[in-house]
Image (tube, rainbow, N blue to C red):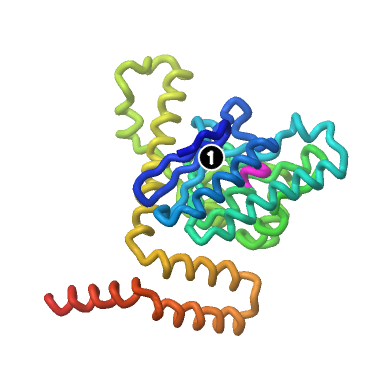
Amino acid sequence: MSSMKYIQIDLLNEIAILRINRPEALNAMNLDVIFELARAIDIISADEGIKVLVITGAGERSFCAGADISYMVNIDAVTAEKYASSAQSVLNKIEKMEKPVIAAINGFALGGGCELSLVCDIRIASENAKIGQPEVTIGIPPGWGGTQRLLRVVGPAKAKEMIFTGKMITAHEAATIGLVNQVISLSDEEKSNLDPSVDQNNEKEKSIALSKLLNKKLLEHCITFAREITKNSFNAVRISKMLINKGMDADIDTGLRLEIYGWALCFAHEDRQKMMGAFLNKNTKK
């Protein structure tokens, strides 16, 4: 489906898997990646056959290492403003997609990579993931939405701790503060069932094989999770997403009134009548 250099799109029935494909730079996002990502999101948004999007990074080491420092080191303030604006524009586009978006965090999600994960609806991380907003360590604050979205997900105190220190946290730490929904680990049995061709005494070879196995398990889990969503009414899911996103920054009365309108709107959709009828028929036969 994709003929782009830095973005790969694979289709699995009603699920699209989007990979940032720049592993030699830990999937950091330069202007070309941002441009291609925006194009890919437009393609996926317009495809009515796609119900859920999974975003991940190519390789096993990194989901996305954020902005491209080798590009940023020599740019001026005007160029920096344009860079951040283009990045925020595509991240806003992902956040506002009608389709649910799952981040499969396979390794580093730093700076813009963490900010990319924050615009996804669900974040699932492999146990070797490292997440952080390290921008202050190179003389800038987060610029792709981190100061705004991180506080809405983990609260202002934890957001300030992560941003002020610039430290990376583990996937398990991220789960305890609600930054990721789930952490995927390999069982002892899975670790012992490596390909026989792998030299168990070669630590580097063994580590690479385990990382590949973990990444495979992460993606399989995200696809299973996505399938659970596709079983439901897409109309009801997309309206639920809109209500949650809009309600986050509204007062409770406005949020509740929006919910009533969203709820009532579903009664005009064929999904509701068909699925309610099927539910009643199923229970009548018991």
Q: Nearer the viewer, residue 33 or 168?
A: 33
Tell me, yes or no, whether the highlighted magenta stretch contains residue 195.
no
Q: Position of residue 132 (x, y in %)?
A: 65, 44
Q: Nearer the viewer, residue 78 or 199?
A: 78
Q: Main secondary structure of the magenta part?
A: helix
- Residue at screen point 75% across, 42% down: 135
Q: Residue furthest left?
A: 285
Residue at the image position 33 percent from the left and 25 percent from the top? 194
Q: Compared to 11, does 74 lie above or below?
A: above
Residue of label 1: 129
Q: Is residue 223 rendered to the left or right of residue 134? A: left
Secondary structure of residue under mark 1: loop
Q: Is residue 132 left or right of residue 16?
A: right
Q: Please report the residue visible at 28 percent of the width from the left and 77 percent of the height from the top.
A: 276
Task: Tell me the crowding category of disc 1: few under 14, some 14 to 19, or many 20 or more residues within 10 angstroms, Cα based.
Answer: many
At which x and y percent is residue 47? Answer: 46, 53
| Percent position of residue 195, x then y | 32, 22
Give the residues drawn in magenta, as a range. 110-114
With 80 as the anchor, is 284 left or right in this view? left
Can residue 122 be seen in the rendering of this structure? no
User: Which amino acid is tagged 1?
Assistant: Ala
Dividing the image into 4 quarters, which one contains the C terminus? bottom left
Give residue 237's quadrant in the image. bottom left
- The reply to whether the magenta stretch includes residue 111 is yes
Q: Quadrant of residue 233?
A: bottom left
Q: Quadrant of residue 97?
A: bottom right
Q: Is residue 30 visible?
A: yes
